[in-house]
Image (cartoon, rainbow, N blue to C red):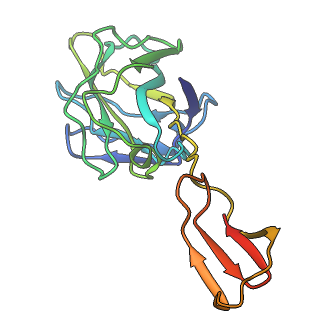
Amino acid sequence: MVSEGANSPGTMADDSAVGTIIWSNVNNAKIDDSSYADASITSATATHYLKATNFSFSIPTGATIDGITVDILKRGAGPPIKDPANDSEVKIVKADGSIGTTNKAIVTNWPTGTNERTDTYGSSTDLWDETWTAENINDTDFGVVISADRTIASEGNPDPKVDLITITINYTEAVIMPNPNKGTKSTKEIATITAEENIGEVLSLKPEGINGVKSTVLSKERVGLEL
Protein backbone atom coordinates (compact mmCIF):
# COMPACT_ATOMS: atom_id res chain seq x y z
CA MET A 1 0.00 0.00 0.00
CA VAL A 2 1.23 3.48 -0.88
CA SER A 3 -0.19 6.94 -0.24
CA GLU A 4 -0.54 10.33 -1.87
CA GLY A 5 -1.12 13.45 0.19
CA ALA A 6 -1.84 15.23 2.32
CA ASN A 7 -3.18 17.37 -0.55
CA SER A 8 -4.87 20.73 -0.09
CA PRO A 9 -7.97 21.83 -2.02
CA GLY A 10 -7.74 23.97 -5.11
CA THR A 11 -11.37 25.05 -4.83
CA MET A 12 -13.38 26.16 -1.78
CA ALA A 13 -17.06 27.11 -1.69
CA ASP A 14 -20.03 27.84 0.54
CA ASP A 15 -22.65 25.22 -0.36
CA SER A 16 -26.22 25.89 0.78
CA ALA A 17 -27.37 22.25 0.47
CA VAL A 18 -27.72 22.16 4.28
CA GLY A 19 -28.11 24.69 7.11
CA THR A 20 -28.72 28.42 6.99
CA ILE A 21 -25.46 30.02 8.18
CA ILE A 22 -23.07 31.23 5.47
CA TRP A 23 -19.33 30.59 5.49
CA SER A 24 -17.19 33.64 4.75
CA ASN A 25 -13.59 33.87 3.48
CA VAL A 26 -13.81 30.29 2.22
CA ASN A 27 -10.46 30.37 0.39
CA ASN A 28 -8.66 30.78 3.72
CA ALA A 29 -9.11 27.02 4.28
CA LYS A 30 -6.68 26.18 1.47
CA ILE A 31 -3.48 26.69 3.48
CA ASP A 32 -2.38 26.67 7.12
CA ASP A 33 -1.69 30.33 7.81
CA SER A 34 -3.96 31.24 10.76
CA SER A 35 -6.40 32.89 8.36
CA TYR A 36 -9.77 31.22 8.55
CA ALA A 37 -12.89 30.34 6.66
CA ASP A 38 -15.43 31.35 9.30
CA ALA A 39 -19.08 31.49 10.23
CA SER A 40 -21.14 32.87 13.12
CA ILE A 41 -23.88 30.60 14.41
CA THR A 42 -26.54 33.04 15.59
CA SER A 43 -29.31 30.51 16.22
CA ALA A 44 -29.84 26.84 16.96
CA THR A 45 -29.13 25.79 13.41
CA ALA A 46 -26.28 24.46 11.32
CA THR A 47 -23.99 26.19 8.88
CA HIS A 48 -23.97 25.59 5.17
CA TYR A 49 -21.43 23.09 3.92
CA LEU A 50 -17.88 24.39 3.70
CA LYS A 51 -16.99 22.52 0.51
CA ALA A 52 -13.43 21.60 -0.47
CA THR A 53 -12.71 20.03 -3.88
CA ASN A 54 -10.07 19.86 -6.62
CA PHE A 55 -7.31 18.18 -4.61
CA SER A 56 -5.04 17.52 -7.63
CA PHE A 57 -4.53 13.81 -7.04
CA SER A 58 -2.72 11.70 -9.66
CA ILE A 59 -3.51 8.14 -8.57
CA PRO A 60 -2.29 5.72 -11.29
CA THR A 61 -4.87 4.09 -13.51
CA GLY A 62 -5.94 0.65 -12.29
CA ALA A 63 -4.93 1.26 -8.66
CA THR A 64 -7.16 -0.09 -5.90
CA ILE A 65 -8.27 2.65 -3.50
CA ASP A 66 -7.77 1.41 0.08
CA GLY A 67 -8.68 4.39 2.23
CA ILE A 68 -9.43 8.11 2.43
CA THR A 69 -8.24 10.27 5.35
CA VAL A 70 -9.47 13.83 5.84
CA ASP A 71 -7.75 16.24 8.23
CA ILE A 72 -9.42 19.51 9.25
CA LEU A 73 -7.55 22.15 11.24
CA LYS A 74 -10.13 24.19 13.16
CA ARG A 75 -11.09 26.26 16.18
CA GLY A 76 -14.45 27.05 17.67
CA ALA A 77 -14.69 30.53 19.17
CA GLY A 78 -12.86 33.66 20.13
CA PRO A 79 -13.23 36.20 22.89
CA PRO A 80 -15.51 37.04 24.57
CA ILE A 81 -16.68 33.71 26.03
CA LYS A 82 -18.88 31.88 23.54
CA ASP A 83 -20.67 28.58 23.25
CA PRO A 84 -18.61 25.79 21.66
CA ALA A 85 -19.12 24.77 18.06
CA ASN A 86 -19.60 21.15 17.04
CA ASP A 87 -19.51 19.05 13.92
CA SER A 88 -22.89 18.70 12.27
CA GLU A 89 -21.84 16.82 9.13
CA VAL A 90 -18.56 15.71 7.58
CA LYS A 91 -19.16 13.90 4.29
CA ILE A 92 -17.24 12.94 1.18
CA VAL A 93 -17.92 14.58 -2.19
CA LYS A 94 -17.99 12.09 -5.06
CA ALA A 95 -16.62 12.53 -8.56
CA ASP A 96 -20.06 13.42 -9.93
CA GLY A 97 -20.37 16.24 -7.39
CA SER A 98 -22.93 14.48 -5.21
CA ILE A 99 -22.53 14.27 -1.43
CA GLY A 100 -21.93 10.85 0.13
CA THR A 101 -24.36 9.52 2.70
CA THR A 102 -21.88 8.54 5.44
CA ASN A 103 -21.53 11.23 8.11
CA LYS A 104 -18.14 11.20 9.90
CA ALA A 105 -18.99 14.04 12.31
CA ILE A 106 -17.45 13.64 15.78
CA VAL A 107 -19.05 14.70 19.06
CA THR A 108 -16.04 16.50 20.54
CA ASN A 109 -16.49 20.27 20.83
CA TRP A 110 -14.31 22.41 18.59
CA PRO A 111 -11.45 23.99 20.57
CA THR A 112 -12.30 27.33 22.17
CA GLY A 113 -10.47 30.62 22.35
CA THR A 114 -7.48 30.85 20.02
CA ASN A 115 -6.58 27.15 20.28
CA GLU A 116 -6.46 25.11 17.07
CA ARG A 117 -6.84 21.36 16.67
CA THR A 118 -6.61 18.98 13.74
CA ASP A 119 -9.43 16.43 13.67
CA THR A 120 -9.02 13.33 11.52
CA TYR A 121 -11.89 11.63 9.68
CA GLY A 122 -11.60 8.27 7.96
CA SER A 123 -8.38 6.28 7.78
CA SER A 124 -6.00 4.42 5.48
CA THR A 125 -8.56 1.61 5.24
CA ASP A 126 -11.82 3.63 5.34
CA LEU A 127 -13.66 4.07 2.02
CA TRP A 128 -16.54 6.09 3.53
CA ASP A 129 -18.96 3.36 2.38
CA GLU A 130 -18.33 4.13 -1.29
CA THR A 131 -16.69 2.37 -4.23
CA TRP A 132 -13.79 4.25 -5.82
CA THR A 133 -11.57 4.17 -8.88
CA ALA A 134 -8.39 6.13 -9.46
CA GLU A 135 -10.30 8.33 -11.90
CA ASN A 136 -12.88 9.17 -9.20
CA ILE A 137 -10.18 10.36 -6.82
CA ASN A 138 -8.36 12.34 -9.52
CA ASP A 139 -11.55 14.11 -10.57
CA THR A 140 -11.70 17.84 -9.77
CA ASP A 141 -15.13 17.38 -8.13
CA PHE A 142 -13.83 14.88 -5.56
CA GLY A 143 -13.56 16.34 -2.06
CA VAL A 144 -15.19 16.78 1.34
CA VAL A 145 -17.76 18.98 3.07
CA ILE A 146 -18.13 20.06 6.69
CA SER A 147 -21.04 21.74 8.45
CA ALA A 148 -20.92 23.03 12.04
CA ASP A 149 -23.61 23.69 14.64
CA ARG A 150 -24.02 24.33 18.37
CA THR A 151 -25.35 21.96 21.02
CA ILE A 152 -25.98 24.58 23.72
CA ALA A 153 -27.12 28.20 23.67
CA SER A 154 -26.18 29.93 26.90
CA GLU A 155 -23.17 32.24 26.62
CA GLY A 156 -22.77 33.54 23.08
CA ASN A 157 -22.80 32.69 19.41
CA PRO A 158 -20.02 30.26 18.46
CA ASP A 159 -17.71 31.20 15.61
CA PRO A 160 -16.51 28.01 13.86
CA LYS A 161 -13.30 28.61 11.95
CA VAL A 162 -11.41 26.35 9.55
CA ASP A 163 -7.76 27.00 8.75
CA LEU A 164 -6.93 24.02 6.52
CA ILE A 165 -8.53 20.94 4.94
CA THR A 166 -6.39 18.14 3.50
CA ILE A 167 -7.00 14.66 2.09
CA THR A 168 -4.65 11.68 1.96
CA ILE A 169 -5.34 8.67 -0.28
CA ASN A 170 -3.99 5.18 0.41
CA TYR A 171 -3.97 2.82 -2.55
CA THR A 172 -2.48 -0.35 -3.97
CA GLU A 173 -0.94 -0.11 -7.40
CA ALA A 174 -2.13 -2.43 -10.15
CA VAL A 175 0.18 -5.36 -10.91
CA ILE A 176 0.85 -5.70 -14.64
CA MET A 177 2.07 -9.17 -15.56
CA PRO A 178 4.34 -9.40 -18.62
CA ASN A 179 2.95 -11.36 -21.56
CA PRO A 180 5.51 -14.07 -22.41
CA ASN A 181 4.12 -14.28 -25.94
CA LYS A 182 4.57 -10.58 -26.66
CA GLY A 183 7.88 -9.15 -27.78
CA THR A 184 9.10 -6.06 -29.53
CA LYS A 185 7.67 -5.88 -32.99
CA SER A 186 10.46 -6.08 -35.54
CA THR A 187 11.72 -8.20 -38.40
CA LYS A 188 15.01 -9.96 -37.74
CA GLU A 189 17.13 -12.11 -40.02
CA ILE A 190 17.87 -15.41 -38.31
CA ALA A 191 19.06 -17.67 -41.13
CA THR A 192 20.07 -17.82 -44.76
CA ILE A 193 18.75 -20.60 -46.97
CA THR A 194 19.07 -21.79 -50.54
CA ALA A 195 15.61 -21.90 -52.00
CA GLU A 196 14.41 -24.67 -54.28
CA GLU A 197 13.31 -23.52 -57.70
CA ASN A 198 9.71 -24.51 -56.99
CA ILE A 199 9.43 -22.24 -53.87
CA GLY A 200 7.50 -19.05 -54.56
CA GLU A 201 9.02 -15.64 -54.19
CA VAL A 202 7.57 -15.16 -50.70
CA LEU A 203 5.90 -17.62 -48.35
CA SER A 204 4.49 -16.64 -44.96
CA LEU A 205 4.05 -19.21 -42.20
CA LYS A 206 2.79 -19.04 -38.63
CA PRO A 207 5.00 -21.30 -36.50
CA GLU A 208 3.54 -23.00 -33.47
CA GLY A 209 5.12 -23.13 -30.02
CA ILE A 210 7.67 -20.33 -30.45
CA ASN A 211 7.10 -17.60 -27.87
CA GLY A 212 7.02 -14.11 -29.29
CA VAL A 213 6.92 -15.17 -32.96
CA LYS A 214 3.90 -13.91 -34.87
CA SER A 215 4.84 -15.12 -38.34
CA THR A 216 7.72 -16.16 -40.55
CA VAL A 217 8.52 -14.75 -43.95
CA LEU A 218 10.32 -17.06 -46.35
CA SER A 219 11.94 -15.89 -49.56
CA LYS A 220 14.46 -17.44 -51.92
CA GLU A 221 17.29 -15.85 -49.95
CA ARG A 222 16.45 -15.59 -46.24
CA VAL A 223 14.07 -16.50 -43.47
CA GLY A 224 12.81 -13.74 -41.18
CA LEU A 225 10.86 -13.84 -37.95
CA GLU A 226 8.39 -11.07 -37.14
CA LEU A 227 8.54 -10.60 -33.34
Q: Which residue is at the front of the view, 15 or 213?
A: 213
Quick one: quadrant of the C terminus?
A: bottom right
Residue 53 visible, this angle: yes
What x and y, as percent, mark residue 34? 60, 27
Q: Residue at x 35, y 21 (%)?
A: 126
Residue 169 visible, this angle: no
Relative to 168, does residue 75 appear above or below in the rendering? above
Relative to 23, does residue 206 appear above or below in the rendering? below
Classify residue 3 as left or right of residue 101.
Answer: right
Residue farthest toward the right in the current orientation of the protein: 192
Q: Residue at x 80, y 79 (%)?
A: 194
The total number of labels drawn is 0
What x and y, as percent, mark residue 57? 54, 43
Q: Residue at x 79, y 74 (%)?
A: 193
Relative to 99, does residue 216 appear above or below in the rendering? below
What x and y, as percent, mark residue 120? 44, 17
Q: Which residue is at the front of the view, 187 or 75?
A: 187
What x and y, as percent, mark residue 94? 31, 44
Classify residue 156 as left or right of residue 61.
Answer: left
Q: Residue at x 61, y 56 (%)?
A: 212
Relative to 86, does residue 184 appear above or below in the rendering? below
Classify residue 193 as left or right of residue 18.
Answer: right
Q: Which residue is at the front of the view, 185 or 61?
A: 185
